[in-house]
Amino acid sequence: MVKRGLGIALAACVALSGCVQTRQYADVQFTPPSGDYKLLVLRPDVTVGSLTTGGMVEPRADWTDEARHYIVDALRTQQAGRGGKITIIEHRNEVPGVTAQELADVERLNYVVDQSIVLHKYLGDYLPTKRGKGLDWTLGQDAVKLGQKTGYDYALFMHAEDAQASGGRIALGVLGLAGCFIGFCAPNVGGQQQLDYASLVDLKTGEVVWFNVVMAGSEIPGIKFGDLRTPAGAAQMVDRLLGRMKPGKEAAKGVVMTPEVPEKH
Amino acid sequence: MCSRCLELTRRSLLIGGGAAAAALHTGTAEARVLPQEMVPLVGPGYKPTERDEIGLWKEMERVEEEIAGSNLLITDPNITGYLQNIIGTVGGPAAKDFRIYLARISDFNAMMFPTGFAVVFSGLLLRMRNEAQLAGVIAHESGHFLRRHMIRSWRDQKRKTDIFAIGAMLAGVGGAGAGVYLGDYVQLAQLGTILSLFQYSRAMEAEADAMGARLIADTGYPPVEMANIWEQLIGEENASARYRGKHRRRGSIFDTHPSEGSRMIDLRADAAEITVPGKAYDNLRERYLTTIGPIRQMLLDDQVKLNDPGASQYLIETLAQDGWNGLLRFYEGEIWRLRNRPGDEQRAAQSYAAAVAYPDAPAEAWRSHGIELMKQGRAGEAKTAFRRYLAMKPDAPDAAWVRSMAS
């Protein structure tokens, strides 16, 4: 429910577009993880619903379960292809060495940091102090401690929500299209809406090193942009969201500074 | 589905936003829901079987996980166990299925979620004068679940927005076919749709009130206490508004809840109807005060620091109708001290002096009393007061400073 708030804010900024959009930001020093790295994926947050005729989203438990299953599979395949060892947890008590409360704290902290990133990087409220610095946010020592206690190199937080146009919504669009022949043209009542975002946290430094948002929406009901309820659609979403991680500005130029060594606690 | 506000869903946010944009004000009168008509619609161990409700329950899983693990919760087992017992008594057929969480938030509120877990704000515990009042609010929340309000209002919204969307489209297409512009009617229909959504929401609140009154009366609490809650709340809001030079907000057609005044009147009528002459009712005030005793200072502290002296003063005076004590006098003094208008320091000093005359005066009352005595040049008495503070709270964060004052 809390996560929805961020979703609404993001969705509102592209309400009028009708395509797939992605926009990613990376820490200037960021190089996409490859080789032998350990990645912890914290409770992928997936919801799939049905877009009613009137435009409300009706959550669907069966679709959500299917989509979560396919997304997790796609994520495993993708990360294994890059050489990483991946652990995906569903509940907060599944990580050995940390309590559910500690994990909840990191998740909540990440959530507010993500909110700040969305506000200042996506919603136009740009900060002059962060100009030209890529992605300059950190979870601080809490994330470093999580890394020390668990031995993971990175933590990935991801959110996916999808609303499939219902039969009634499609019919409404068809009616709007039919109206075009007599001078009232309204085919674009709004169809499938998908919103996904992910943030990658380096557990050695605590920094949010990479952030991406994918928004897919169709103004015309019936036109789909990858269906999370199918293995292919889920794989496509995971690829759009995480498949093309770009390195940070300085890392891309080959300027590599010595990473700061975090203090031991 | 809460007792006063906070509808947390996306759709209600959107609708609320749209509605708030057009601020119309008018009186709202709706027919009273009769308690005897309020029969529970779910039995023990209820689980959803229909697709939309299953989806709604699924969404709630993580919400409950988040709330259950929130660091805003008060987890004292005596108090949470007490709340669980109350909902286990006034919860009707689903009594044993409910979960109840207490959040440390100083507002007057409680809410029921679609899957049968309730959240009560600590501000409610401060305001309730006896167990019957608390049970009344909890029974109201149980009523939302027992009458299946969440899924019913969801279906109502879905149906109405569907009809509006189709109607608007037909008006457009049909209007174009007939060569007339129906846009104005479409806008009117949209307003009508939004208004009927709020009306439905208010009707459900009225149902929950009637159901709640019936549940507590069956359990043996005097049902009139539910009406008293609203009387107290209206008084508090009046006092708060008066202090700020404003008027208390009255009901409007965009409210999700009936106005406090109409709820109070309906609940009084309900109480008169369901009270059985000769039956013994007990508001269990003593048990209530004993149970919340250990956190009452915290509740008062949270309230007084809201910087709402009008409301805080009203609350303390209302609670004091059941008898003044050291805790209430001390926080009365704190209201004046924090308000800091001319003459408030003298008022605060008097309250502190009155507070320490009671055996239950909190340690802080002795410290504040000592400071005021010191300012009046009564150093000897001040030192005695400081020593009393140190004896009660030897490990207080400011003990070193107070010790130097006392020596």
Image (spheres, rainbow, N blue to C red):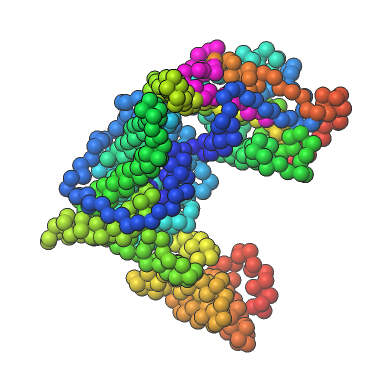
Residue toward you, B188 or A256: B188
Residue stretch in magenta? A211-232
User: From this viewpoint, which residue is outermost toward the bottom?
Assistant: B377
Q: Is residue B268 left or right of residue B197?
A: left
Residue toward you, A160 or A75: A160
Give the mark count: 0
Residue A232 position (above or below residue B339): above
Residue B228 position (above or below residue A93): below
State which quarter of the image contains the N terminus of chain B: top left
User: From this viewpoint, which residue is outermost toward the left?
Assistant: B278
Residue A136, image quadrant: top right
Residue B342, image quadrant: bottom right
Note whether residue B9 is visible: no
Residue at 48% across, 70% down: B245
Residue toward you, A77 or B185: B185
Image location (x, y in percent) of residue A52? 40, 27
Residue at 48% across, 53% down: B104
Residue at 67% across, 30% down: A211
Q: Is residue A73 left or right of residue B64?
A: right
Image location (x, y in percent) of residue A96? 60, 29
Residue at 28% across, 49% down: B206
Is B382 inside the magenta-drawn segment? Answer: no
Residue toward you, B330 or A74: A74
State which quarter of the image contains the C terminus of chain B: bottom right
Image location (x, y in percent) of residue A18? 57, 24
Q: Is residue A187 left or right of residue B213?
A: right
Image location (x, y in percent) of residue B324? 39, 74
